[in-house]
Image (spheres, rainbow, N blue to C red):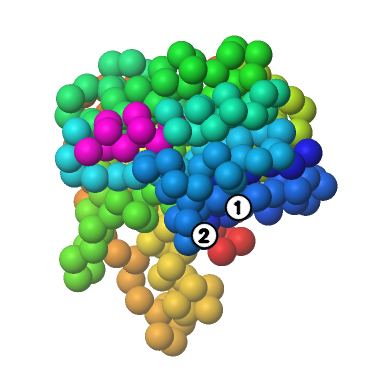
Amino acid sequence: MQITVYGATGTFGHPLADALRERGHSVIPAHRGIGVDTATGEGVTEAAEGSDVLVDCVNFTHVSRHRTLDFFSRSSRQIALAAAEHPGASVVCLSIAFKPAAASRMFGYYQAKELQEKVYRRLVPTEQLLIVRSAQWFELVESTSLTAGPVTIVPNMRVRALAAAEAARMTAEAIDAGERGTLEIAGPEISDFATIARTISRAEAARSSGGLPGGRGARRPRRVVGIPIPGPVSRDGLIPDSPRLSAVTVEEWLRTR
C-alpha cells in the first residue's frame, strides 16, 4: 500500500514511517518541511494523491486552550477533506488515551483530542476510519519535566505508559491488518510520571559511570519531585480500559537508547 503520514518527522511519526516501510509499504512523509501544513491546508490534498491510507499523527501543544482546539479542529478537517477527494482512502488518527472526565477546561489538550476524534467520526465513513488511542509515552515524561540543579520536577499523572516506538509498531500492525474502529494501546504496567522519572534518573546516573555505581565520574541520580495534578488524571483518567499491551518496560526502553 501507499501510505501518507502527516507529521512524519515527529516522535511518533518518524518510527511509524520506518515501521510501515519495514512492512513493505510505500510511505509519503508529509510535513511542514516539504510544504505540507495541515492547519492551513497547504499541500494536504496533494500529499494524499495515490495513497490508500492517510495517517494523522500531527501534534500541537500550546498554553492557550483555544489555540489548541482551533489547531486540531482545522488540521483534522483538512485531512478528512483530503480523504474525501480520494475515494477509497482510509484514515488513521493518532489520538490519546483518556476518559471523558479528563477532558476538562483545565486540560485543553485532551479537549482538543476529543474534538479531533469527533471531526473524523463526522466526516469519515466508519468503514474507512481507525482511531488509535495511545497511552502516554515514556518520552513524554522527559519532555514535560523541568530541571533545576539536582532536582527534576514532573507533573505526577497516573499512566500506563509505553515507548513511542512501540506505539508506532502496534499502529503499523493495525494499519497492515486493515483494522477499523477504535484501538487502545498501552504499556505493560500502571505507574506515574514521578516513578518513571526516577527510573530514568537512575539510569542516566549509572550511564555516567559506565554502569558501575560509585564509578569514576559517577553522579547521584537527580531528586524527582512529583507535582500533584488535581482531578481524574491523578487517578484513572488516563488509564485505558481494555488496551492492547506492549511488553516493553521503561527499563528495557532505556537500554535501547
Residue 182 visible in the picture: no
Measured Cα–Cα span from mark 1 to mark 2: 9 Å
Identify residue for label 1: 29
In reply to whether residue 244 is colored magenta, the answer given is no
| Spot occupied by residue 67 in the image (x, y as percentages of width and height) | 22, 38
| Spot occupied by residue 82 in the image (x, y as percentages of width and height) | 54, 32
Q: Is residue 30 left or right of residue 201?
A: right
Which residue does the image show at 37% across and 18% down from the upper left?
Answer: 99
Tell me, yes or no, whether the two marked residues, 1 and 2, touch with CB atoms within 8 Å: yes
The stretch in magenta equals: 67-76
* Element type at mark 1: strand
In reply to whether residue 72 is colored magenta, the answer given is yes
Which numbered circle lies on residue 85?
none
Q: Residues within 10 Å of mark 1 (few under 14, many from 20)?
A: many
Which residue is at the far right?
24
Which residue does the image show at 49% across and 17% down from the upper left?
Answer: 123
Q: Is residue 66 left or right of residue 12?
A: left
Amino acid on which the number 1 mark rests in the picture: Pro
Q: Quadrant of the N terminus?
A: top right
Q: Residues within 10 Å of mark 2 (few under 14, many from 20)?
A: few
Residue 206, compared with residue 23, is above or below; it is below
Which residue does the image show at 37% across and 49% down from the upper left?
Answer: 141
Q: Main secondary structure of the magenta part?
A: helix
Amino acid on which the number 2 mark rests in the picture: Ile
Residue 115 visible in the picture: yes
Which residue does the image show at 77% across and 28% down from the upper left?
Answer: 177
| Sooner in the amino-acid sequence: mark 1 or mark 2 | 1
In this rendered view, identify the residue nearer to me: 190 or 233.
Answer: 233
| Spot occupied by residue 252 in the image (x, y as percentages of width and height) | 59, 53
| Spot occupied by residue 98 in the image (x, y as percentages of width and height) | 39, 24
Which numbered circle lies on residue 34?
2
